[in-house]
């Protein structure tokens, strides 16, 4: 399949693996790259720029194909060493970066000077337009269904994607709720040039996370995610568990008075305990409603080949027959 996204990133299939904290290691990015998609190492999961440089080098031993890096810009008291991470990306010869969180304007000139294509992930048309205006090459449009941070506007992809198509000139991918060939064809029909998946890629053989997490995704239904941190305007969609129930009870009890410190035990530093150790009650972890569409744990190549096969069958079979 040829779209503006496959051309921009020089990939075979219009499928991107979004940055995922404690999931987006070299194994994940390489498996997606080897299967013809755009795989991304999650920059900030690496403690320091030197670790990211090593992770990029490690990924190169696993694939000859190009892969990218996700850089998430979060508001924080002591910001990570972003210039250092960007240097590691440039020195590592990376040619694709997914930015997310705050406006990446400050970092765009140096990325572009080094021939790096930038796709910014955002959850609203206004932020997508901003990303376009500052020179991003593409946008990843994350609907309300998505795992992780859906923003505060709560617009699902059936509205958000065609709205993005109405306004944007740069190509965009649909993100949030994408799982299979149906998602891809729907995304293309709504105006996107590809799709980005997070949660679905976690339930693959190569995803370098504990089997308990994969089992939880297969067991979960579309009713099992919750929105946390709404009162802090830092909404996150997570899979329900005991820690999430505790956190939501605190939100209810403290109302508008709640502070980050009140819930720190449920959210801070929990990713390694969940993703690496498989302690499923350790805290809140990002998960999309798409969990309801995840019924197996294939290899990444099986997943991507299946998506492309289904997409072809829908376009050239089911839809073509209807249109005859
Ligand atoms: C476990 C997990 C961790 C994530 N961590 C990040 C992150 O560190 N940075 C980021 O930009 N997006 C992160 N995301 C969001 C994904 O990149 C992607 O936008 C989202 O998962 C898409 O929705 P989906 O899960 O419905 O496919 C994370 C998602 C998950 C499921």
Image: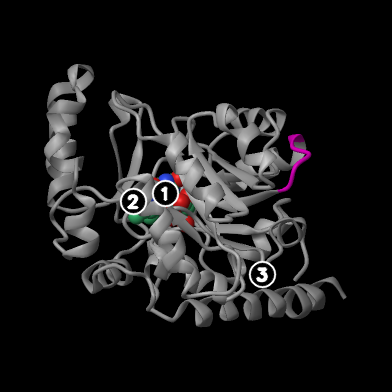
Please give the residue where the numbered disc 3 appears in the rendered image: 13
Question: Which of the marked residues, 3 or 1, is nearer the chain's N terminus?
Answer: 3
Asked whether, in this view, residue 228 is left or right of residue 273, the answer is: right
Q: Is mark 3 within 8 Å of ligand 1?
A: no
Give the Cα separation between the discs numbered 3 and 1. Answer: 23 Å
Label ID, residue 46 = 2
Name the dominant secondary structure of the magenta segment: loop
Magenta highlight range: 167-171
On whether residue 237 falls in the magenta region, the answer is no
x, y percent for residue 183: 59, 63
Residue 266 figure quarter: top left
- Label 1 secondary element: helix
Asked whether mark 1 lies closer than 8 Å to ligand 1, one says: no
Position in image of residue 15 (x %, y %): 60, 64
Residue 205, above or below 123: below
Give the quadrant of the C terminus. Answer: bottom right
Using the image as rendered, state which of residue 301 and residue 189 is in the foreground.
301
For image coordinates 43% across by 39% down, the residue present is: 84
Identify the residue position indicated by label 1 in the image. Answer: 43
Quadrant location of the N terminus in the rendered image: bottom right
Residue drawn at (38%, 66%), measured in percent from left and top? 202
Viewed as shown, does residue 167 lie left or right of 291? right
Residue 147, visible in the rendered structure: no
Q: Residue at x 63, y 44 (%)?
A: 118
Secondary structure, mark 2, is: loop
């Amino acid at each position: 399949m040829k779209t503006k996204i496959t051309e921009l990133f020089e990939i075979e299939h219009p499928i991107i693996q979004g940055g995922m904290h404690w999931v987006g290691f070299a194994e994940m990015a390489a498996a997606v790259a080897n299967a013809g998609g755009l795989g991304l190492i999650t920059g900030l999961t690496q403690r320091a720029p030197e670790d990211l440089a090593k992770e990029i080098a490690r990924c190169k031993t696993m694939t000859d194909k190009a892969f990218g890096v996700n850089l998430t810009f979060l508001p924080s008291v002591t910001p990570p060493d972003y210039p250092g991470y960007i240097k590691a990306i440039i020195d590592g010869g990376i040619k694709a970066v997914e930015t997310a969180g705050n406006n990446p304007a400050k970092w765009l000139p140096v990325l572009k000077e080094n021939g790096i294509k930038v796709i910014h992930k955002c959850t609203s048309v206004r932020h997508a337009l901003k990303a376009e205006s500052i020179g991003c090459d593409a946008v990843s449009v994350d609907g309300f269904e998505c795992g992780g941070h859906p923003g505060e506007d709560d617009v699902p992809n059936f509205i958000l994607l065609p709205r993005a198509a109405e306004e944007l000139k740069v190509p965009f991918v649909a993100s949030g709720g994408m799982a299979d060939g149906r998602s891809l064809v729907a995304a293309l029909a709504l105006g996107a040039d590809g799709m980005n998946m997070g949660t679905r890629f976690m339930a693959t053989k190569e995803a370098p996370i504990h089997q308990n997490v994969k089992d939880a995704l297969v067991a979960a239904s579309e009713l099992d995610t919750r929105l946390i941190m709404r009162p802090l305007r830092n909404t996150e969609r997570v899979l329900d568990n005991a820690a999430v129930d505790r956190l939501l009870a605190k939100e209810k009890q403290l109302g508008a008075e709640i502070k980050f410190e009140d819930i720190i035990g449920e959210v801070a530093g929990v990713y390694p305990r969940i993703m690496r150790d498989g302690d499923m009650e350790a805290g809140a972890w990002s998960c999309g409603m798409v969990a309801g569409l995840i019924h197996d744990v294939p290899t990444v190549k099986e997943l991507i080949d299946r998506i492309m096969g289904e997409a072809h069958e829908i376009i050239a079979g089911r839809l073509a027959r209807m249109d005859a």
